[in-house]
Image (spheres, rainbow, N blue to C red):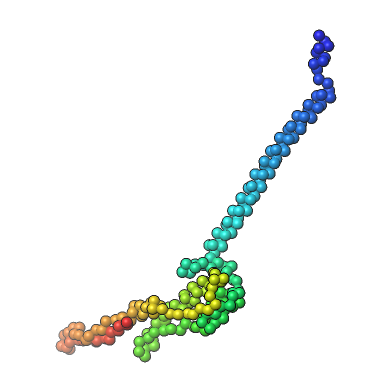
Amino acid sequence: MLNKQNSSKKTGSERVREARKRSQKRGFTADINMRAVAVLVAAFIILVLIAISGLQKVGKFLKSSKVDGTEVTTEIADEKLKKQITIDEIDITGMKMSEAKAAIDKVYPWKLTLHIGDDLSDSMVLDNVLDTKVTKLLNEIYADVDNAASHYEINFDDADIDSMVEKAKEKWNINPVNGSISGFNKETKSFTYADESDGYLID
């Protein structure tokens, strides 16, 4: 009976080997957990980088200036024109957009005013429709340089003329007034008259 109990007991070396196996299993499990954590961290970092890149693109989009449906980002506006392009007789090659605009404004300064007859005191400065046209044209050129033409011309169309005429009508379209009796002065026993005034019709 005693011999059977002794034989069922494990030796010290066996217990050491089992302890080592248990330790190795725990270490293997820990390694698996660490690898999973590392993968999750890497995935999180990638997502953060993608989000940052997306925010940068959104930032550029928000900084873009929109003129008549044409978008020109700040980066494009700061680039010098590498293509040979002229507007009328003005060569804007090698210029930034602001430099090209300044060169055109120097050749075509806007000084268009209207007045009736010789009375210069009652005049009107017309809106600078040229500025809008030039800005729109430069936006189109710099936004797509590869497909831009080598020469452009600045032209006024009927819509431009009509807009200026409408502004003048708002100011000077006045109906004429005939002279008429405006009242009677009892003291002088005479009628008072309202002066006539000229009218204007702009067409």
In percent of width and height, residue 191 lies at 17, 87
In percent of width and height, residue 149 lies at 53, 75
Report whether residue 168 is seen: yes
Is the residue 70 above or below the residue 57 in the image?
A: below
Please identify the residue farthest to the top as the structure is shown.
1
Which quadrant of the structure image shows residue 169?
A: bottom left
- Residue 88 located left or right of residue 123: right
Q: Nearer the viewer, residue 35 or 87?
A: 87
Query: Which residue corresponds to the image point at 31% horizontal and 80% vertical from the top-left?
Result: 173
Query: Which residue corresponds to the image point at 47% horizontal and 67% vertical from the top-left?
Result: 69
In percent of width and height, residue 121 lies at 38, 86
Report whether residue 77 is seen: no
Query: Which residue corresponds to the image point at 81% horizontal and 26% vertical from the top-left?
Result: 16
In percent of width and height, residue 101 lies at 53, 77
Number of numbered discs on residues: 0
Query: Which residue corresponds to the image point at 82% horizontal and 15% vertical from the top-left?
Result: 7
Quadrant where the C terminus is found in the figure: bottom left
Is the residue 80 above or below the residue 194 in the image?
A: above
Please identify the residue farthest to the bottom as the structure is shown.
118
